Amino acid sequence: MPIPIEVLEAEALSLPQADRSRLIDRLIASLEKDPEWEAEWSAEADRREERIARGESAWVPGREAVARVRSKLV
């Protein structure tokens, strides 16, 4: 009988941070991968890095990026 998701979630959230991080990595790795999506995202990441290297774009700290997105959703 499977463990109820609420129980599993509570157990996972009670783990130390390092264990939660390991669990996340393993769960993500277990998901079915879409090779076409991965190739497209890899190409986009390369384009973004090239724009940064040419000075056309700049890195944005994660918190700032999230704040920008949130401000557009409100």
Image (cartoon, helix red, strand yellow):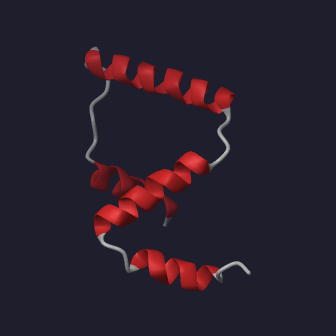
Q: Is residue 30 left or right of residue 69?
A: right
Is 11 in front, or is 40? 11
**Along the viewing direction, whichever of 48 and 15 lies nearer the viewer:** 15
Which residue is rendered at x = 27% and y = 31% of the image?
Answer: 58
Q: How many marks?
A: 0
Point 27% across, 35% down: residue: 59
Nearer to us in this view, 48 or 19: 19
* Residue with the most extreme front position: 1
Q: Which quadrant does the N terminus fall into? A: bottom right
In the image, farthest residue toward the right: 1
Measuring from the top left, give residue 30's x and y in whole percent: 60, 49
* Residue 8 location (% of width, % of height): 55, 79
Q: In percent of the image, x 50 and y 53: which residue is there?
A: 26
Please, is residue 66 above or below residue 54 in the view?
below
- Residue 69 screen position, x and y as percent: 43, 54
The residue that appears at 45% across and 60% down in the rendered structure is 23
Q: What is the quadrant of residue 55 in the picture?
A: top left
Estimate the x, y position of residue 50 in percent, counting from the top left. 36, 16
Residue 60 image-quadrant placement:
top left
Q: Nearer the viewer, residue 2 or 45?
A: 2
